[in-house]
Image (spheres, rainbow, N blue to C red):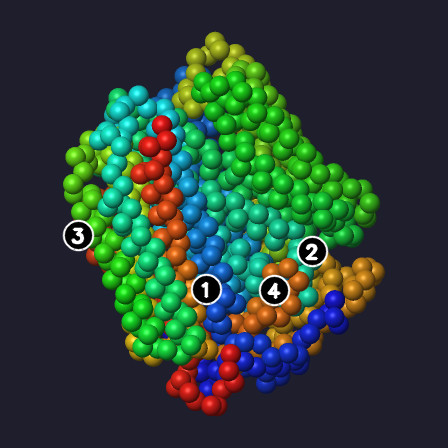
């Protein structure tokens, strides 16, 4: 491991952190770089706990999953382009639409946002890393292994095939005898571990790792979005993990939770799934809305209108989001009272959403917009959000939902919401932060082309789906007869989907070209207000040479905004260089509270991730002894990880009654 | 604000009790684990409210052994707490003794629970109630075993002289997890053993 111990660091239990400055090239700065940089080569690659490396891995991996899910969608659109096509068998089609949903919803949409937040949080918060760097690495490795796990049975033609919400009894052993559903069930439990530890890390990072002075009302909206999503995940993930685990028990052990013949209830599955599922919908859009709330104002040359209202509406959306899961089950035969209540609650959600929409519109209206690529993606997002939100309010009305349930109208709605509110901000966000990630600007001409092709292709592809739904076309059918009146809408949808894919392709070409030939980026090429733009592009391993003191919401715009509260100090701050160190602050006011010792790079996360994935593989293959062995390996990895270390001052370095150290 | 803030005061370094990252992390972990048990008990009440079967199949459960076991588990929490107090007062031997006792009581709980399982007339697969009973108590048993491994590690670390009255965050944090395992048992106990008496 890359233990850079020189001139034995100060391990006293209490000290006054030194305030100073460390310009590039100074002795202090060189020392910091040595402390924080990972070892070169594969060792550093496997053991790094740098949030920037992990964030980029999340982004790249999730984007590869987006491409895989996209290719699955294109194959399905070929099949549906004309009636009575025989490109795919019904079983192949079932596996494709299931894997398309699983990939996009679980392996792309949240992980890509975790990628942004992992990379950006410490930089936005003025910190040197996340609260738990090793946990962060673990979260990535398990995500990667769970993704591979979920795809492992795909080449064998045995992929999950009961739709992404996997209703019983169809997903039960009686109707689905192969390994398909077991792969899905175990893969989801494994992925749940990754999401949970990632969420724990975000929550604690927000409460403890902000720069001094960055009180809770000064954090960027992206931080609010990811915090809200993470808190929701903490409460919601256990529900879906439990549901899948119970299903696996039903299938492999012979329990009766969903077994209708022996008193089990299929609706229990629907409740558990959607109690998780609906908060999840907001978990995959709120951080993306945060991306827009932070980046859009940069291109409008003014602060976001209604910061507090947007922050509060973010949380209100999620709070309400826990009370609307029944709207996925309107047609399941529940009591009318429940339908009315949950229908009303679902409509109420449009209020906080509208607050955010009007805040963005007002920001554009009152600003001086710069019409470049990121702005186009964010403005396009606002339009798609309104369309997707509107069809959402329509399906929240119980009688209309009875009509539209299980038709392409719902498919249109969820794609407007998920692509509109997730993919467009994500691509816009990559255009926006690409200079920070790689130190080069992206090509503007190709950027505009990619936006317009994607935007036109998207609307051409997905708007006709509303019509297909109103014409009564059910979702998840592998083909249709020529006399149903669905031929034209399906052909248009298929053409649109390929145009959309071409837009994504232009975007990818732009990335490849810009990585090599893009203009070199200054630290703050967009003249943006938040802290991540105060450091070099790309940022050094230690992020901030000194921990800044923050005095306002827009530390880099203080010269022109008069927000009161004095000036932030970015050049002068805590040095903290007795080993890897960070400052812990109080949860609300961000006053200095503790000097945190941060862990060095470690292989433990990789091996713990690997052993847990292998344990799940053992469960799937019924290798009992192997599973037990891997569980023991997991425990040993955890013990090694948790073992109290002197270097982290988790235990006392000196003997008990040594008078050298100050008391704690 | 920057001026109002005191930036030049001495701060604790490293894992200082409840200011350490680990304390916060385990608190959040407990929230998510607590939710897991919440969903388990929701599943129990949901299925119990909808069932047409005889519930529980054996008739009302006996409270004697489960009640005794509950007391044993709660007592072990008290001794974990005492062990931490002893470290604060520099009584390392007492701390060690108290942690040993806590560990022993935890093992007693496991033994009694295993015996309770073995005398049931149904198994996990014989009926819906059995599936619920063994899954819920099984989940809790898993948490107890993880907790016992943690207590064992704490015992070892105390014996190795890793901690003194200034730094013992591992004991605080590990103890927190054990208290959670015990408190959540009260909910499991109330659901499986007390609630059938209500209807």
On the image, the x and y values in percent for residue B126 come to: 20, 31
The 10 Å Cα crowd at callout 1, few under 14, some 14 to 19, many 20 or more, is many
The residue at 44%/49% (across/down) is B32
Q: Quadrant of residue A517?
A: bottom right
**Considering depth in this image, is A369 or A390 the residue closer to the camera?**
A390
- Same subunit, tags 1 and 3: no
Q: Nearer the viewer, mark 4 or mark 3?
A: 4
The disc at residue B22 is 1
Query: Does residue A212 appear in this view?
Result: yes
The disc at residue A586 is 4
The residue at 46%/87% (across/down) is A8
The disc at residue A579 is none
Q: Is residue B8 above or below residue A433?
A: below
**Considering depth in this image, is A63 or B57 the residue closer to the camera?**
B57
Measure the C-alpha gap from mark 3 to mark 2. Answer: 53 Å
Q: Nearer the viewer, mark 4 or mark 2?
A: 4
> Which sits earlier in the primary sequence, circle 4 or circle 3?
4
Residue bearing the label numbered 2: A217
Chain letter for mark 2, please.
A
Query: Does residue A498 appear in this view?
Result: no
- Same subunit, tags 4 and 3: yes
> Which sits earlier in the primary sequence, circle 3 or circle 2?
2
The residue at 41%/70% (across/down) is B85
Q: Is residue A632 above or below residue A457?
A: below
Q: Is residue B136 left or right of residue B29?
A: left
Measure the C-alpha gap from mark 1 to mark 3. Answer: 33 Å
The 10 Å Cα crowd at callout 3, few under 14, some 14 to 19, many 20 or more, is few
Measure the C-alpha gap from mark 4 to mark 2. Answer: 13 Å
- Same subunit, tags 4 and 2: yes
On the image, the x and y values in percent for residue A14 come to: 54, 80
Measure the C-alpha gap from mark 4 to mark 3. Answer: 47 Å
């Amino acid at each position: 491991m890359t233990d850079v111990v020189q001139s034995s660091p100060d391990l006293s239990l209490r000290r006054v952190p030194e305030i100073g400055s460390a310009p590039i090239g100074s002795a202090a700065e060189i020392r910091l770089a040595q402390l924080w940089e990972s070892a070169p080569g594969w060792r550093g690659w496997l053991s790094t706990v740098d949030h920037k490396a992990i964030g980029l891995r999340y982004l790249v991996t999730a984007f590869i999953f987006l491409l895989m899910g996209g290719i699955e969608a294109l194959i399905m659109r070929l099949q549906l382009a004309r009636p009575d096509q025989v490109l795919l068998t019904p079983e192949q089609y079932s596996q494709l639409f299931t894997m398309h949903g699983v990939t996009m919803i679980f392996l792309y949409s949240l992980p890509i946002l975790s990628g942004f937040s992992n990379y950006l949080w410490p930089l936005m918060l003025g910190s040197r890393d996340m609260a738990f760097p090793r946990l962060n690495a673990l979260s990535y490795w398990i995500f990667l292994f769970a993704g591979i796990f979920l795809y492992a049975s795909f080449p064998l033609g045995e992929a999950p095939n009961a739709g992404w919400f996997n209703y019983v009894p169809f997903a039960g052993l009686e109707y689905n005898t192969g390994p398909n559903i077991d792969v899905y069930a175990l893969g989801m439990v494994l992925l749940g571990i990754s999401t949970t530890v990632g969420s724990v890390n975000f929550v604690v990072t927000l409460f403890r790792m902000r720069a001094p002075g960055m009180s809770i009302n000064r954090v960027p909206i992206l931080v609010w979005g990811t915090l809200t999503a993470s808190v929701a995940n903490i409460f919601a993930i256990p529900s879906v993990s439990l549901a899948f685990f119970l299903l696996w028990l039903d299938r492999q052990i012979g329990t009766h939770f969903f077994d209708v013949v022996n008193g089990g209830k299929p609706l229990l599955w629907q409740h558990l799934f959607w109690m998780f599922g609906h908060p999840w919908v907001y978990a995959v859009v709120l951080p993306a809305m945060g991306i827009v709330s932070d980046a859009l104002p940069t291109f409008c040359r003014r602060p976001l209108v209604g910061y507090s209202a947007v922050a509060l509406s973010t949380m209100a959306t999620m709070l309400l989001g826990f009370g609307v899961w029944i709207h996925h089950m309107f047609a399941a035969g529940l009591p009318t009272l429940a339908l009315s209540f949950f229908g009303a609650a679902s409509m109420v959600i449009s209020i906080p959403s509208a607050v955010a929409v009007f805040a963005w519109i007002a920001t554009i209206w009152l600003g001086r917009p710069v019409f470049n690529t990121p702005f186009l993606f964010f403005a396009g997002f606002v339009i798609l959000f309104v369309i997707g939100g509107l069809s959402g309010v329509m399906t929240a009305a119980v009688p209309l939902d009875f009509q539209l349930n299980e038709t392409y109208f719902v498919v249109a709605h969820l794609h407007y919401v998920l692509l509109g509110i997730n993919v467009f901000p994500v691509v816009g966000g990559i255009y926006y932060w690409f200079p920070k990630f790689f130190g080069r600007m992206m090509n503007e001409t190709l950027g505009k082309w990619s936006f317009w092709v994607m935007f036109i292709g998207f609307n051409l592809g997905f708007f006709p789906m509303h019509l297909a739904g109103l014409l009564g076309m059910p979702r998840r059918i592998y083909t249709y007869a020529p006399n149903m009146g669905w031929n034209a809408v399906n052909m248009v949808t298929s053409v649109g989907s390929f145009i959309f894919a071409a837009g994504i392709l232009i975007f990818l070409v732009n990335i490849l070209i810009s990585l090599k030939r893009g203009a070199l980026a200054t630290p703050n090429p967009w003249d943006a207000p938040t802290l991540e733009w105060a450091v070099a592009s790309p940022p050094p391993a230690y992020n901030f040479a000194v921990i800044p003191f923050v005095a306002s919401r827009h530390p880099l715009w203080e010269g022109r905004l008069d927000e009161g509260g004095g000036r932030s100090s970015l050049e002068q701050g805590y040095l903290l260089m007795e080993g890897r160190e960070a400052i812990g602050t109080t949860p609300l006011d961000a006053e200095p509270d503790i000097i945190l010792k941060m862990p060095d790079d470690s292989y433990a996360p990789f091996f713990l991730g690997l052993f847990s994935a292998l344990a799940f593989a053992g469960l799937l293959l019924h290798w009992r002894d192997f599973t037990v062995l891997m569980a023991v390996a997991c425990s040993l990895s955890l013990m090694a990880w948790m073992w109290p270390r002197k270097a982290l001052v988790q235990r006392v370095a000196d003997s008990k009654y040594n008078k050298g150290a100050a008391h704690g | 604000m920057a001026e109002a803030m005191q930036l030049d005061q001495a701060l604790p370094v490293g894992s200082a009790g409840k200011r350490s990252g680990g304390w916060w992390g385990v608190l959040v972990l407990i929230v998510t684990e607590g939710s897991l048990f919440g969903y388990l008990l929701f599943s129990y009440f949901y299925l119990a409210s909808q069932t047409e079967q005889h519930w529980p199949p054996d008739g009302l459960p006996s409270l004697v052994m489960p009640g005794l076991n509950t007391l044993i588990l709660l007592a072990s929490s008290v001794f974990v707490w005492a062990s931490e107090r002893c470290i604060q007062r520099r009584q390392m031997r007492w701390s060690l003794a108290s942690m040993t006792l806590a560990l022993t009581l935890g093992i007693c709980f496991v033994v009694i629970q295993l015996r309770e399982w073995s005398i049931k007339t149904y198994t996990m697969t014989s009926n819906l109630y059995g599936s619920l009973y063994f899954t819920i108590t099984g989940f809790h048993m898993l948490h107890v075993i993880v907790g016992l491994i943690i207590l064992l590690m704490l015992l070892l670390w105390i014996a190795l002289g890793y901690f003194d009255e200034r730094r013992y965050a591992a004991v605080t944090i590990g103890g927190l997890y054990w208290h959670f395992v015990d408190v959540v048992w009260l909910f499991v106990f109330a659901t499986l053993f007390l609630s059938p008496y209500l209807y």
